[in-house]
Amino acid sequence: MSSLPERLNTALGGASSTSVWVRRFLIVLTVLGCMVIVGIVFWFLAIIVHPIILLFIGVVIAYLLYPLSKRLSRHMPRALAILLTY
């Protein structure tokens, strides 16, 4: 019965043990690099999510109050109608 390293070596097509370790090392580096990139993306999203939520809420409020300010602007100057609406 052959030992495990010999079977691995045969399964890999006769690759040397150095190339096997280099391949494993590169796989580990690739996985760690992907984890770092995903972490940076999530960190960036955590920073910008609050301003985006505030901007979205402001847009919704402005959209909802626009008809009222438009109706008031028929009877008074537009700036005063907007000031009264908000």
Image (cartoon, rainbow, N blue to C red):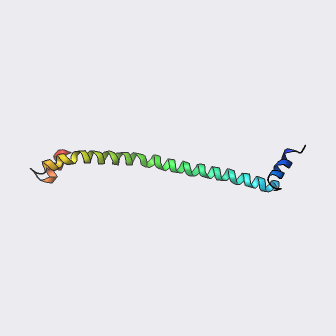
Using residue 35 as the reference point, say whether residue 57 is left or right of it.
left
Residue, far left:
75
Which residue occupies 15% across, 53% down? 78
Picture quadrant of residue 86? top left
Residue 56 percent coordinates (x, y) = 34, 47
Residue, far right:
1
Residue 76 percent coordinates (x, y) = 10, 51
Which residue occupies 16% across, 45% down? 84
Which residue occupies 55% across, 48% down? 39
Q: How many marks?
A: 0
Residue 80 percent coordinates (x, y) = 14, 50
Using residue 24 as the reference point, say whether residue 76 is left or right of it.
left
Which residue occupies 34% across, 48% down? 55
- On-image quarter of the N terminus: top right
Using residue 84 as the reference point, say whether residue 28 is left or right of it.
right
Residue 43 percent coordinates (x, y) = 50, 48
Q: Nearer the viewer, residue 15 or 72?
A: 15
Q: Nearer the viewer, residue 83 or 71?
A: 71
